[in-house]
Amino acid sequence: MKVEELIEIARREPAPEPSGPLLPGVLARLDALPTPEVRVLTAACLVSGAVASLLGIVVLTSAPPEPDPLDALVASLDPRFP
Amino acid sequence: MDDIELARHGDAAALGRLVVAHQEFVGRLMWRFTRDRLEWESLVQDTFVEMCRSIRDFRGDAELTTWLARIATRVGYRSWRRRRRDRRRALPLPPDAANRLPATPTPTEAASLLHELLARLDPPERLALTLVYLEGLTLREAAQRAGWSEGGMKMRLMRARQRLADEARACGLEPGDLP
């Protein structure tokens, strides 16, 4: 069989019948959508979250201070001989 | 005022009537995008949700069905892109898949095999073939429906025909010569 023939036959296939009325499902989905107020809040949270993450990255990427060589020297001294 | 105008002005009952009046039309379109009944119903509902959300933007420059078909195409195409990774993991069709078809297959049998073949293509190629050969749109209409340029549609269609011919050959179909 040729592809063209397969397509020609397949085109005639009818769509199935929905299992029930579609409208209630559409309305339920619309109801579940966030209201404009919720969307604004979500956006605000996302922005503040992003800012917080950014600050976290800045803090994390700031290199920790180098240990002072003098501290190391002091720590290595034997406390028995101050 | 007709239902479209009423719906544009926030009349929920008119919006409901538009959904009921166009559910067969949208249902038929979405059946090109999936063979799974549950997913099909979900895609039909998604299309109407998008319609309800953007009906205010409908200017009436085109028929409502043209506008709705564009929304449905966008919804269906998005579902293909989501499943793209799964398709790559799909097993190849058996080399005798075409021979398992009866001599005169029913539309459902033919459509099942065709969808299996198309599911192995990239979403843009699949959309080009679906719009032009299954929906029977001209190149220009298909480009408008997909929101692509006519040249872009032509290029995708050319590539898609080649890919379909390869897939068809691999499962025992004659690649034929799609116009």
Image (cartoon, coloured by chain):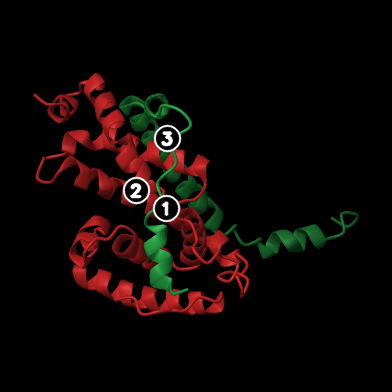
Chain colours: A green, B red
The amino acid pointed to by label 1 is Phe
Chain assignment, label 2: B
**Relative height, residue B11 to residue B24 (above, below):** above
**Residue named by callout 1:** B33
Q: Secondary structure at mark 3?
A: helix
Residue A34: % across, % down: 38, 28
The reply to whether discs 1 and 2 touch (Cβ–Cβ < 8 Å) is yes
The answer to which image quadrant residue B92 occupies is: bottom right
Residue B54: % across, % down: 24, 37
**Relative height, residue B90 to residue B163 (above, below):** above
**Residue named by callout 2:** B29
Q: Residue at x 69, y 62 (%)?
A: A70
A1 or B162, which is in the foreground?
Answer: A1
Number of the label disc, if any, that sits on residue A45: 3
Q: Quadrant of the C terminus of chain B?
A: bottom left
Q: Residue at x 19, y 26 (%)?
A: B7
Q: Residue at x 66, y 61 (%)?
A: A67
Q: Secondary structure at mark 1?
A: loop
The answer to which image quadrant residue B46 occupies is: top left
Residue B59: % across, % down: 11, 40
Residue at mark 2 shares a chain with residue at mark 3: no
Chain assignment, label 3: A
A33 or A49, which is in the foreground?
Answer: A33
The answer to which image quadrant residue A68 occupies is: bottom right
Q: Using the rendered image of the protein, determine whether residue A49 is visible from the camera's viewpoint.
A: no
The amino acid pointed to by label 2 is Leu
The reply to whether discs 2 and 3 touch (Cβ–Cβ < 8 Å) is no
